[in-house]
Amino acid sequence: MAKTLVILILLFDGTLIKERLDFSRPMEVHECLMFADDHRETISKYVETKGWVLNDGRGTIQGFICE
């Protein structure tokens, strides 16, 4: 069961950060990953040469961890 989604973000200055989203209820891992996909599409856009660029322009999404 996953209680937290960790989003791995690489800032354009080279800093790697982990943003945590705590769920209100535990989820199965596949539910967490589906949520992560939806969340990624909400907070970023895909740019062919850069990958998933955050809408706020800070950097790119590198991946997710469901804990």
Image (cartoon, rainbow, N blue to C red):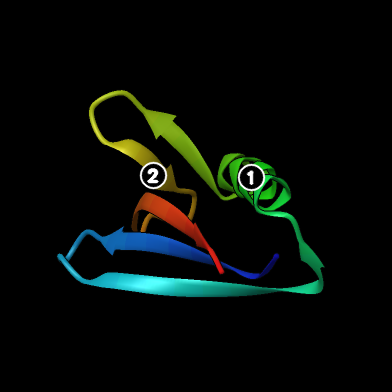
Would residue 57 appear left or right of 67 to someone viewing this image?
A: left
In the picture of the structure, the residue carrying the numbered disc 2 is 53
In the picture of the structure, the residue carrying the numbered disc 1 is 42
Neighbor class of circle 1 (other Cα within 10 Å; few <14, some 14-19, many 20+) is few
Counting from the top left corner in percent of width and height, residue 34 is at: 67, 42
Quarter location, residue 41: top right
Q: Quadrant of the N terminus?
A: bottom right
Q: Quadrant of the C terminus?
A: bottom right
Instruction: Specify which label sits upstream in the sequence, 2 or 1.
Output: 1
Q: Residue at x 65, y 53 (%)?
A: 29
Would residue 53 appear left or right of 31 to someone viewing this image?
A: left
Q: Reply above or below: 13 against 62.
A: below
Q: Give the residue at the far left of this rendering.
A: 14
Quarter location, residue 3: bottom right
Counting from the top left corner in percent of width and height, residue 30 is at: 67, 45
* Contact (Cβ within 8 Å) of mark 2 with mark 1: no
Counting from the top left corner in percent of width and height, residue 12 is at: 21, 59
Q: Amino acid at mark 2?
A: Val
Q: Amino acid at mark 1?
A: Thr
